[in-house]
């Protein structure tokens, strides 16, 4: 049995899962950073080959994450494909336990997944990898650029945008991301998948209204702007804050569940710090967790720590 655990909240993770399923026939579980250890520990014992895609953890959880992978490697052949920051010592320990590590911060996870399985994939699959590159804003990288040169860029941008907007609109609805993985792995284009074009258009309408809300309700503190929101895809709110307040860092905060807040950070090229490492460090100090990339990251903190987190962030950015 082949099994894949991949990131649920963005197209890079969805595309990586779809490519893995297309290449290996793997059963797929989609997860988020807050559930990754739980879902890895729940991998069926029948799984003989395990693929972990687009899932990084913050510094405080690196130890338990590696321990879990080592345990899984004792009973299955494990391939870990990722592009989040990973300390050199962690890479060494992962490789020593026999895990195949495919790791490069300079490419998105779906491109790395495509490169890993390209000999097992049908020719149109490079377009699926490019959906992840475009939506992760990493289509300028060497490997992604080479693949983009061999197709129509506007076609890829249109299909990737449909997929991303539809996921934003329906991300909180159980089963939708899993359906996307099934349909994409079968070779269907986003515009052909039932519900995707309609959901994408609805999301565009919502974002247009959201722009006005961000201008009215957002607040600036030093070099960052923040807003409390009920939007499930709160990364969009964080992104809109950048333009509304002309700041290098936008922070969107929503209730994840009673007593817990989800925090999303987005940055511009003027941001001077690595937001993934920053939220990882700060959320850990506040009793939460977090991580991500240099200009896009997220975390979980206790509900009563919001003001403290914003003060800490404003001093760093």
Image (cartoon, rainbow, N blue to C red):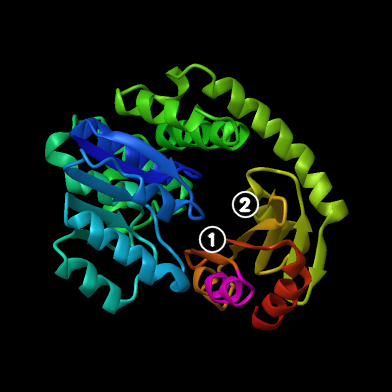
To which quarter of the image does residue 182 belong?
top left
Q: Where residue 143 is drawn, which disc sits there?
A: none
To which quarter of the image does residue 309 belong?
bottom right
To which quarter of the image does residue 288 belong?
bottom right
- Residue at horizontal 86%, vertical 54%? 217
**Residue receiving disc 1:** 296
**Residue receiving disc 2:** 235
Percent across and percent down for residue 225 are 75, 65
Q: Nearer the viewer, residue 110 or 284?
A: 284
Q: Work out whether 169 lies above or below 255.
A: above
Query: How far is the residue under mark 2 from the one under mark 1?
Result: 8 Å
Indicate left or right for 5 with 248 as reference. Answer: left
Q: Nearer the viewer, residue 39 or 199?
A: 39
Asked whether residue 2 is in view, the answer is yes
Q: Nearer the viewer, residue 129 or 44?
A: 44
Tag 1's secondary structure? strand
Percent across and percent down for residue 42 are 36, 45
């Amino acid at each position: 049995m082949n099994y894949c655990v991949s990131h649920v909240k963005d197209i890079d993770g969805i595309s990586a899962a779809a490519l893995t399923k297309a290449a290996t026939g793997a059963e797929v579980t989609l997860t988020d950073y807050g559930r990754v250890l739980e879902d890895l520990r729940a991998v069926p014992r029948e799984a003989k080959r395990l693929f972990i895609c687009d899932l990084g953890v913050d510094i405080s959880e690196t130890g338990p994450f590696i321990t879990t992978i080592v345990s899984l490697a004792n009973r299955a052949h494990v391939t870990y494909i990722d592009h989040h920051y990973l300390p050199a010592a962690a890479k060494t320990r992962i490789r020593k336990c026999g895990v195949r590590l495919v790791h490069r911060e300079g490419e998105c996870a779906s491109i790395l997944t495509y490169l890993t399985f390209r000999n097992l994939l049908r020719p149109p699959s490079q377009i699926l990898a490019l959906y992840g590159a475009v939506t992760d804003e990493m289509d300028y990288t060497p490997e992604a650029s080479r693949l983009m040169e061999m197709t129509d860029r506007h076609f890829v941008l249109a299909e990737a945008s449909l997929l991303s907007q539809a996921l934003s609109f329906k991300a909180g609805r159980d089963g939708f991301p899993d359906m996307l993985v099934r349909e994409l792995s079968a070779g269907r284009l986003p515009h052909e998948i039932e519900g995707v074009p309609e959901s994408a258009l609805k999301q565009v309408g919502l974002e247009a209204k959201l722009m006005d809300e961000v201008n009215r309700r957002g607040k600036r503190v030093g070099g960052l702007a923040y807003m409390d929101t009920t939007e499930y895809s709160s990364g969009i709110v964080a992104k809109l804050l950048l333009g509304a307040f002309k700041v290098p860092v936008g922070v969107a905060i929503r209730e994840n569940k009673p007593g817990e807040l989800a925090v999303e950070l987005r940055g511009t090229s003027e941001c001077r710090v690595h937001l993934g490492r920053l939220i990882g460090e700060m959320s850990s100090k506040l009793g939460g967790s977090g991580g991500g990339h240099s200009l896009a990251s997220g975390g979980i903190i206790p509900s009563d720590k919001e003001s403290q987190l914003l003060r800490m962030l404003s001093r760093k950015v």
